[in-house]
Image (cartoon, grey):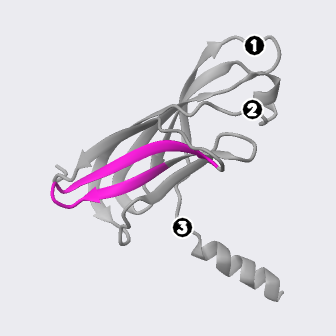
């Protein structure tokens, strides 16, 4: 019982990371066996900033390996974040804080989105990039949201 309580407390201390909601997808390469290669579009709300939604597009590898979750997806991704309501901070923001993370290979590769707050320009900046245990990728995309009054 003590181990269960410790595990539960540990889970509560994990950083708050958003979950993606599928928006749509298009096939890019036909595969005879298994799902096609595709580009997927997902949305997630910033867990600490009410009124912000980010849209992420990325390649998803198909085929037999992709269907079994064993394929490694490409590192490229695109991101667009928008103000969708009044912006309110639910908690204190940390520079470079991870707001979204998704596995893009069986073990070693992840795609993540981190947030920065440009106080001088009153703007939220979101960066998407991919990393690996051994070597990450310099490919990245960035989007920015000026914090404006919501009408």
Question: Pointer 3: residues within 10 angstroms few (<14), some, or many (20+)?
Answer: few
Of circles 1 and 2, the one toward us is 2
Q: CA distance from mark 2 to mark 3?
A: 27 Å
Horizontal arrangement in the rendering, residue 68 relative to residue 124 (left or right)? right
Instruction: Mark 3 and mark 1 in contact? Answer it, CB < 8 Å.
Output: no
Q: Quadrant location of residue 96? A: bottom left
Which residue has dot 3 on it? Answer: 15
Quadrant assignment for the N terminus: bottom right
Q: Which residues are magenta?
A: 113-132
As displayed, is residue 19 above or below residue 36? below
Earlier residue among tags 2 and 3: 3
Earlier residue among tags 3 and 1: 3
The residue shown at (70%, 77%) is 8
Which residue has dot 1 on it? Answer: 31
Residue 33 position, x and y percent, is: 83, 16
Residues 20 and 97: in front is 97
Q: CA distance from mark 1 to mark 2?
A: 14 Å
Q: Magenta span has 122?
A: yes
Q: Quadrant location of residue 28? A: top right
Question: Pointer 2: residues within 10 angstroms few (<14), some, or many (20+)?
Answer: some
Residue 115 position, x and y percent, is: 38, 55
Q: Magenta span has 43?
A: no
The residue shown at (49%, 42%) is 129
Q: Residue furthest front?
A: 134
The number of numbered discs placed on residues in the rendered structure image is 3
**The label number, if any, that marks residue 71 in the structure image:** 2
Q: CA distance from mark 3 to mark 1?
A: 38 Å
């Amino acid at each position: 019982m003590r181990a269960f309580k410790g595990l539960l407390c540990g889970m509560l201390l994990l950083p708050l990371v958003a979950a993606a909601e599928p928006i749509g997808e298009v096939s890019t390469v036909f595969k005879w066996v298994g799902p096609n290669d595709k580009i997927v579009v997902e949305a997630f709300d910033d867990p600490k900033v009410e009124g912000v939604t980010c849209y992420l597009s990325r390649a998803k590898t198909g085929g037999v390996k992709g269907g079994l979750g064993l394929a490694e997806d490409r590192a490229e991704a695109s991101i667009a974040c928008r103000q969708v309501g009044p912006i309110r901070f639910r908690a204190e923001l940390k520079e470079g804080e991870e707001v979204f993370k998704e596995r893009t290979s069986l073990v070693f590769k992840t795609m993540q989105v981190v947030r920065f707050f440009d106080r001088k320009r009153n703007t939220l900046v979101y960066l998407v990039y991919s990393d690996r245990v051994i070597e990450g990728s310099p490919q990245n995309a960035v989007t920015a949201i000026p914090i404006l009054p919501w009408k």
